[in-house]
Image: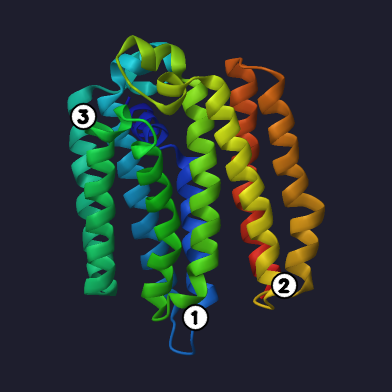
Amino acid sequence: MLLNSLFNLIKLTRPLNGVIAFVSICVAVFISSENGTTISIYLLAALSGAITGAAGNVINDIYDVEIDKINRPDRVLVSGKVGTRLAVIFYFLLVTTSLLLSYIISIQNLLIVLGATILVFIYSKYFKRLPLAGNLIVATVTGFAFIYGGVAAGNYSENIFPALFAFMTTLIREIVKDIEDMEGDSSFFVNSFPIAYGITKAKRLILSLTILLIIMTTLPFILKIYNIEFFIVIMLILNPFLVYSLKLLFNSDSKVEMRKVSSILKAVMIIGLIAIVLGL
C-alpha cells in the first residue's frame, strides 16, 4: 500500500519531465563549468531544479483536477489514486526541499527557485486561463533552468542560447497542448489562445514560431559559438523533426495528432541538448 502510494506520488510529478530537467541543468552547469565546479554543484543544481519542476507539475494538477476529468482522465488525482490533501502536503514538501537545496548552492540560486515557484503557482491559479500569458510563463521558467545551472557554475552567459532554445521549444509545445486541451478548457472557461482566436490562428502562430526557431538554431554555428557537430545534428535531425511536427500539426486537429506533435517537440528538446554538448 505504501509503495503504491509512493509510486502514484512520483507519477504525479511527471518523472520523465523531471529527468529532462535534471539532464538540462547538468548540461547547463557543464557548459558554464570552470575548474572549481564540483560534482556536488552538479547534483545540487540538477536536483533542486528537477524538484522545482516536479512541484510545479503537482500544483498544476491540483488546480486542474476538474479540467483533467475531460483532458487527462488517466492522471492520478482525477482517478483518485492520490487525494488532494496528500498532493498539497507533497507539494509543500517538494517546494521546501528545492528551496533548501538551492540555498546550499547560493543566495542567487535560492532567489531563482523562489521566483520560479511563485511564477508557476500564479500560472496554475490564474494565468493559465489567459491567452498566451500562461504559455509565456511556462516557457520562461523552462528557459531559466539553463540560466539557473549557469549561475550555479558561476557563469550564466554561456547558457543564453540554450535558454532561448528551451524557451522557444516550450512555447511552441504549450500552444500545441492548448489545441489538444480545447475540449476540457472551454468547459471550464479557460481562455487559451486557440479558444480565444481559433485553431487556424493558433496553428499559424506555431508555424511562425517554428520557422523562427529553425532560423535561430543555425545562428550559433554561423556566429562560431558551436562547432560543426552542432550544425550537423541540427540540420540532419532536429530541424527535420520540427518540419515533420508541422506536417502533423496541419494534417489534423485531433487530440491524437496534437499529442504526437507534443511528443516530437519534447524529443526536439533532448536532441537540442545533445547538439549543444557535441558542438562545444
**Residue at (34, 22) in percent of width and height:** 191
Disc 1: which residue = 33
Q: Which residue is mark 2?
A: 222
Q: Nearer the viewer, residue 134 or 18?
A: 134
Q: Is the Cβ of the residue at disc 2 closer than 8 Å to that at disc 1? A: no
The quadrant of the image that shows the N terminus is top left
Spot occupied by residue 25 in the image (x, y as percentages of width and height): 47, 62
Mark 3 or 2, nearer chain start: 3
Q: Residue at x 72, y 72 (%)?
A: 222
Q: Tell me the quadrant of the picture where the C terminus can be found.
A: bottom right
User: Left or right of 126: which side holds 28?
Assistant: right
Tell me if mark 1 has few (under 14), some (14-19) or many (20+) residues whose alpha carbon lies within 10 angstroms of its own. Answer: many
Distance between mark 2 and mark 1 Cα atoms: 24 Å
- Tag 2: amino acid: Ile
- Closer to the chain start, of discs 1 and 3, is 1
> Between tags 2 and 1, which lies in front?
2
Q: Earlier in the sequence, mark 2 or mark 1?
A: 1
Q: As displayed, is residue 143 above or below residue 263?
A: below
Q: Residue at x 78, y 45 (%)?
A: 240
Q: Which residue occupies 54% across, 20% down?
A: 199
Q: Which mark is residue 86?
A: 3
In the image, residue 113 lies at what x, y percent? 27, 58
Q: Is residue 94 left or right of residue 237?
A: left
In 3D space, how far apart are the residues under numbered discs 1 and 3 (Cα atoms)? Answer: 39 Å
Instruction: Locate residue 78 relative to residue 181 in the image: left or right.
Output: left
How many numbered circles are shown? 3
Q: Is 186 situated above or below 108?
A: above
Q: Is residue 47 visible?
A: yes
Check disc 1 and report its element: helix, strand or loop.
loop
Q: Position of residue 177 (x, y in %)?
A: 50, 28
Using a 10 Å C-alpha cutoff, classify the residue at mark 2 as few (fewer than 14 neighbours), some (14 to 19) or many (20 or more).
few
